[in-house]
Image: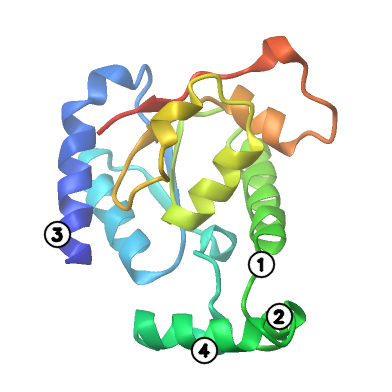
């Protein structure tokens, strides 16, 4: 299913290429299998350098990873009755840590790309955490959450806002464009 989603997303993006003002000069991807497969499919459309970055990975589920969804929910619910810190003891990555990783990755690629058009391939929860931190004018298009195999157009100015420690002024909201 993941490989098929990757190919479908690459196809959708190629059909929306006219929305991309400049073709990407770099593709940066999470090193996890599905994201990497998506990036490689996109690389067929835009044959540019591909960099892998573990900071673009999905949230770590710690010892809950590999369990069926129902089993993981049951285990987490039981653990949460003890303390929220129990999740961290199990290696479960909280949103704050995902946000820190996202900040590191985006700040790095903002500078490393030197403003060149860059495709970033990550995961649904990672994107949700980033988008929650951005001053997005048309936030309603994110409801209820960012779907798997969805594509979004964001300019480096938005990434600068996310990477900045300065307060964001009301006039600095950005427009988010969904490509599929």
Q: Which mark is residue 75?
A: 4
For marks 2 and 3, give the one nearer the viewer. Answer: 2
Give 122 or 180, whichever is nearer the viewer: 180
Q: Along the horizontal axis of the image, is 143 left or right of 156? A: left
- Residue 144 in percent (x, y) is at 41, 43
Distance of label 2 from label 4 (alpha carbons):
13 Å
Compared with residue 5, is residue 84 higher up or lower down, i.e. above or below?
A: below
Residue 171, by quadrant, is top right
Asked if labels 1 and 2 touch by Cβ distance under 8 angstroms, the answer is yes
Q: Badge 1, how many Cα within 10 Å: few under 14, some, many 20+?
A: some
Instruction: Describe residue 77's horizontal placement relative to residue 71 as left or right.
Output: right
**Residue 137 in the figure: left or right of residue 69:** right
Specify whether residue 66 is in view: no
Residue matched to label 1: 94
Which label belongs to residue 159? none
Tell me the SS state at disc 3.
Answer: helix
Mark 4 → mark 3, Cα distance in angstroms: 31 Å
- Give coordinates of residue 96: x percent, y percent: 72, 58
Could you give the CA–CA distance between mark 2 and mark 1, rounded to whole angstroms?
7 Å
N-term mark: 2 or 4: 4
The reply to whether the C-beta atoms of the residues labelled 2 and 4 are less than 8 Å apart is: no
């Amino acid at each position: 299913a993941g490989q098929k989603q990757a190919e479908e997303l690459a196809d959708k993006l190629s059909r929306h290429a006219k929305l991309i003002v400049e073709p990407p000069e770099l593709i940066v991807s999470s090193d996890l299998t599905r994201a990497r497969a998506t990036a490689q499919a996109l690389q067929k459309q835009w044959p540019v350098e591909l960099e892998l970055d573990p900071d673009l990975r999905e949230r770590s589920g710690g010892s809950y990873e590999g369990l069926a969804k129902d089993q993981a929910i049951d285990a987490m619910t039981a653990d949460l009755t003890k303390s929220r810190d129990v999740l961290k003891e199990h290696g479960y990555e909280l949103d704050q840590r995902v946000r820190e990783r996202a900040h590191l990755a985006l700040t790095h690629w903002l500078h490393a790309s030197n403003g060149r058009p860059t495709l970033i391939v990550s995961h649904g929860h990672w994107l949700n955490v980033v988008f929650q931190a951005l001053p997005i004018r048309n936030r309603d298009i994110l409801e209820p959450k960012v779907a798997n195999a969805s594509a979004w157009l964001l300019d480096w100015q938005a990434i600068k806002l996310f990477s900045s420690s300065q307060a964001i002024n009301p006039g600095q909201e950005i427009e988010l464009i969904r490509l599929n």
